[in-house]
Image (tube, rainbow, N blue to C red):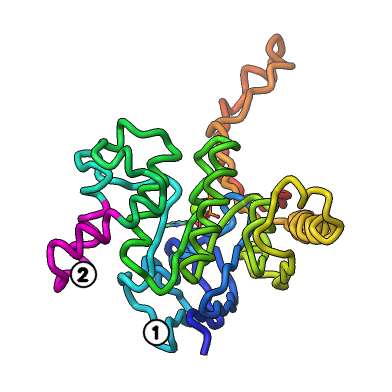
Amino acid sequence: MPLIEIKGASKGFGLPGNRTEVLKNINLSLNQGEFVVIVGYSGSGKSTLINLISGLVKPDAGEALIEGKKITEPGPDRGLVFQNYSLLPWLTVEENIALAVDEVFRDWTKEQRVAHVKKYIEMVKLTAAAHKLPKELSGGMRQRVSVARTLAMQPKVLLLDEPLSALDALTRATLQDEISDIWRENLTTVLWITNDPDEALLLADRVIPLLPTSPATLGEPMVVDLERPRDRKTLNHDPKFKKLRTQLITTLLDAKGRTKSKTSVKLTMPDILPEDLTYVNSLQFLTRSGPKRRSDNKREEVEVAV
Ligand SMILES: Nc1ncnc2c1ncn2[C@@H]1O[C@H](COP(=O)(O)OP(=O)(O)OP(=O)(O)O)[C@@H](O)[C@H]1O
Ligand SMILES: [Mg+2]
């Protein structure tokens, strides 16, 4: 049985008449120990998709399952790492992680919990900063705390929603390698969301494109059978990597090219028609009926490429 499954899920937001359908017929399965990356355009529904699994979003149709059980709410078996770190600003690195550990492992002794927190701080190379507050850390360090806090809760699956997109390219590269190493050493199951095809291919066992088909749908999964550990410098010259990259980018670009969305726009015009002044010096002007009002504002439907 897959660890995580999404079956025929659809999700939209808003009330009838002003509704956006975001995801349609999403089917996904994630096996124990797999590293799966979903790559898609900004605003295409990536967070909505990962939140079907985190339990923060409920599908309108279909279902999301963990070990065959329906997901109805968030739980410690699914660890979520957000794009923007989400640390408590008044707690140190150690305290931020301890808060989560104390919550999840309530029946452990104090010593066990302290040792556990220490282990995860070491894992993300933050021992020297353990007593610092988030405001004293760089973006990369904050995201390390965020990852350590989530890993320390020992979830069955690690859900990462564009975890590195707020970081500069060099820090991003370092953290990609570090998280990949942690995954290999800990045999965690990972679902990673990104808008970067290179990041997807560097990290994943399988990459699944989220196609901007309005509502978005998942494309064909691509198996990334590149040897690990992967070295970003040599990958760039690897024919297999280059082929996968072209295939992935073409799939995403083609889907975007086919996308057109219908938008209904209400045009608001001044409620008055300009007066015809051609006859201003003639008798006809004296008998004019006065300025006219636009009796109705028309709705127009236009097609725009997005
Ligand atoms: N709670 C909500 N209420 C209304 N609309 C929402 C809600 N959540 C998401 N949406 C809409 O759904 C669409 C997809 O949003 P989502 O956050 O899933 O995209 P994304 O791919 O994660 O975007 P980004 O790349 O910017 O993180 C957007 O049009 C967004 O406005
Ligand atoms: Mg998002």
Residue range of the region highlighted in magenta in the rendering = 97-118
In depth, the one of 27 and 176 nearer the eye is 176
Q: Earlier in the sequence, mark 2 or mark 1?
A: 1
Look at 20% across and 43% down and name the residue there.
91
Look at 54% across and 83% down and name the residue there.
7
Look at 72% across and 56% down and name the residue there.
260
Q: Which residue is labeled 2 in the image?
A: 105
Residue extending farthest to the top is 281
Q: Residues within 10 Å of mark 1 (few under 14, many from 20)?
A: some
Relative to 15, 279 lies left or right: right
- Classify residue 40 by image quadrant: bottom right
Relative to 217, 271 lies left or right: left
In depth, the one of 141 and 162 nearer the eye is 141
Residue 123 in view, yes or no:
yes
Please name the amino acid that badge 1 sits on. Answer: Lys
Residue 290 in the image: above or below residue 53: above
SS for dot 1: strand
Look at 74% across and 69% down and name the residue there.
225
SS for dot 2: loop
CB contact under 8 Å: marks 2 and 1: no
Residue 21 in view, yes or no:
no
Residue 162 percent location from the top left of the image: 52, 52
Q: Residues within 10 Å of mark 2 (few under 14, many from 20)?
A: some
Please name the amino acid that badge 2 sits on. Answer: Phe
- Classify residue 224 by image quadrant: bottom right
- Classify residue 67 by image quadrant: bottom left
Residue 302 percent location from the top left of the image: 70, 50
Residue 70 is tagged as 1
Residue 185 percent location from the top left of the image: 49, 65
**Number of disc labels:** 2
Residue 136 in the image: above or below residue 163: above
